[in-house]
Amino acid sequence: MKYGSLKWNRVDIYFVHMLLLFLGISHYFGITFLNIAITVLIGFVLIFSENLKKRIVILFTLLPFFNLFTTEIGNTSLYYLFLIFVLFSVIKKNNWKIKKGKIWLILCGIIITLFWRDIVVQIKWILVFSFLCIMTDNSQLEKSMPMLIKHISISTIVASVIGYLMMIMDKSIYNNSIVYLSGKTITRFAGLIGDSVFYSQFCVILIACILAFCIMHKLSIRFSIFTSIILSGFVLITYSKTGIILLVFTFICYALVYIKNNLKNNTTVIKAIFFSIVFLIVTILTVNYIVKHQNTDLIKSFMLRFSAKDLWTGRNSVSESYFEKLNSSIIYMLHGMSISMYTSNGAVVGATMITRAHNIYLETLCLFGVLPAIFIGILAVKKIYNIVRKKRNFLCQIIPTVVLLLSGISLHGHIEWPYYFLVLLCYSTLGYVEKEEWF
């Protein structure tokens, strides 16, 4: 299907993009009343959208601006209200029916998180987790994926530009991620997400999804390359080692997939060889530039981050600390620990107290317990396997999932708002089946 055959009214979704731009400007100047007014207006656009697929696309389009749907940055986001409305719409579309397996999974999640003893964190987690469960294998979402990825890419770029302006003008409260360089500090970019490592994870997975749909011919090559380059630029100024390594990994994987899919096409092979030579030349020129400009702050920051004695940035001591917590009580092994226990008495790395596990697999053990963690692992592997075994060519669609799994080695996420949305994006990209009609 050609890109031009996507015939559905997109006036309201582009109107949402315009409102998001105004919302960013409003927060930049600190106009509280306007922040709320624009948020309410976006809510009305979501409510009056004429079909469920469009509501889903709009909901994900709003995601990069999650922290701005409030009177001021730092307060609880009104995005949760948008989430509840779309969740309600999905259940209504299914005639108020939810599969028993999903209901049991949500109920188990509610019971286990009672042991967190933090009602606010639990309610937020239940909302996002319920959305993940109910939207998994949802045909409305999977059919919407190409358009969804397109619009979330646009809104992420706009949010990143606004976040960058806030950072350089010192208007953002999210300036704790820094690089210490020769007596001065350099702020690591975090977009509007607020944390440089989570922002880089968000962008890299989004790039992986963009390239997946590009290779499937569901997004144009120009759009895919343009957005990927811009997002890659923002990833670089996060100075996140995990993000940059995964970014390189993503591009190499898709280059190999592209070559594999076109081995029988001599023209494509010649193009691949040509671009490989260009890439080699660019790499040599880049290395030469770095050698000659080692005194610039940008180059110094990268050299400092990637030449440190501890490339894991203290994560080994963090892991040891959390394993000690986990082993301190048999109760923690059975159903996990409270949020206060999880986020207190962490490991000291440099001058910073680390109060998260910085590993999604270790965090799963800490928050849910060993037996539930094993169940979650088996369920995840089974869901991925059931999709992969039905597909002849799944390589380009599984790369976002692989990137997400690899990022979990150095990043946590269960009680961070972006994580389950990324899980859903990766899973829906993997499960996407080409349809002749999306909307």
Image: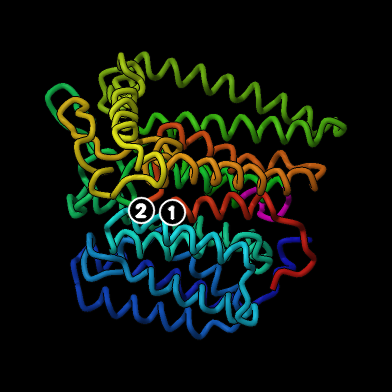
Residue at 65% in and 21% down: 277
Residue 233 vs 290, above or below: the answer is below
Which residue shows up at 19% across the image and 52% down it?
Answer: 173
Q: Which quarter of the image is occupied by the N terminus?
A: bottom right
Residue 136 figure quarter: bottom right
Residue bearing the label numbered 2: 161
Number of other residues with Cα within 10 Å of mark 2, as a class: few under 14, some 14 to 19, many 20 or more: some
From the top left corner, tell me how far across and down residue 255 is, in percent.
66, 32
Determine the main secondary structure of the stretch shown in magenta: loop
Q: Is residue 278 above or below residue 165?
A: above
Question: What kind of element bears circle 2?
Answer: helix
Which of 115/193 is in front? 115
Give the residue number, with chain letter if any, for mark 1.
157
Q: Position of residue 66 (x, y in %)?
A: 36, 62
Please name the amino acid that badge 2 sits on: Val
Residue projecting furthest to the front: 330
Element on which disc 1 rests: helix
Disc 2 to disc 1, how far (Cα)?
6 Å
User: What's the residue type where badge 1 is placed?
Assistant: Ile
Q: Quadrant of residue 295?
A: top left
Confirm whether the magenta stretch covers residue 75. no
Mark 2–mark 1 contact, CB under 8 Å?
A: yes
Q: Going by the image, does 349 lie left or right of 277? A: left
Report x, y in % for residue 19: 39, 73
Q: Is residue 234 visible to us here?
A: no
Q: Residues within 10 Å of mark 1 (few under 14, many from 20)?
A: many
Is 52 placed above or below 129 here? below
Tell me what residue is drawn at x 59 percent, y 81 percent.
92
Q: Which residues are magenta?
A: 216-222
Residue at image point 18% right, 67% down: 30
Q: Position of residue 116 (x, y in %)?
A: 31, 53
